[in-house]
Image (cartoon, rainbow, N blue to C red):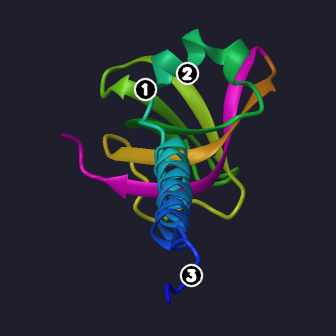
Amino acid sequence: MRRLTAPPTPRRRVSRRKGLRVAAVGLIILVAVVIGYLGSAPTPDRLPSDVLAQAPALLGQEIRVRGIVTGWDPGNSTFLLSDTADGGVTLPAVYTQGLPHEIRTGKEAVVLGTLREAAGGYRIEVREVIVGHPK
């Protein structure tokens, strides 16, 4: 007597498709993470002259500025940043938490802050200051 058997179920195909779906979802998540990481990469430091040249577009944005301190007033927590030590174009920076004692004329500083309009020009309201040595 011949035995009737059911045709084999396509299990391999179903599990293969499921595996491909899992791999595709994993790849999509990986790509999203990489794009998110690259999108949140820190912005490069700008020079004061670059900031002033692009000031209308940068107003209200948080930016990083690198420059040489060409003047400072510890009384009102303000200092001037310039591209070079000899002055030229300067960008006023206001640090409301009191100036770090390392701020001195001729030292390099990197500031992170928000660009604002000021009387007769622009200023950066500083949130963070890193003071170093001139290059």
- Marked residue nearer the N-terminal end (3 or 2): 3
The vertical placement of 89 against 32, above or below, is above
Residue 47 has which mark? 1
Please state which of residues 6 and 72 is positioned toward the viewer in this rendering: 6
Classified by dominant secondary structure, the portion drawn in magenta counts as: strand
Query: Disc 3 to disc 2, how far (Cα)?
Result: 83 Å
Range covered by the magenta-colored residues: 120-135
Tag 3 residue:
4
Residue 12 picture location, percent across and down: 45, 69
Residue 93 on the magenta segment? no
Residue 14 picture location, percent across and down: 55, 66
Q: Residue at x 46, y 50 (%)?
A: 34
Tag 2 residue:
51
Please state which of residues 79 and 36 is positioned toward the viewer in this rendering: 36
Q: Is residue 58 left or right of residue 53?
A: right
Rate crowding at label 3 as few (under 14), some (14 to 19) or many (20 or more) other CA atoms within 10 Å. Answer: few
Q: Residue at x 39, y 50 (%)?
A: 104
The residue tagged with tag 3: helix, strand or loop? loop
Q: Is residue 8 left or right of residue 70?
A: right
The residue tagged with tag 2: helix, strand or loop? helix
Image quadrant in which you'd find residue 44? top left
Amino acid found under the numbered disc labelled 3: Leu
Rate crowding at label 2 as few (under 14), some (14 to 19) or many (20 or more) other CA atoms within 10 Å. Answer: many
Q: Residue at x 64, y 45 (%)?
A: 113
The vertical placement of 76 against 102, above or below, is above
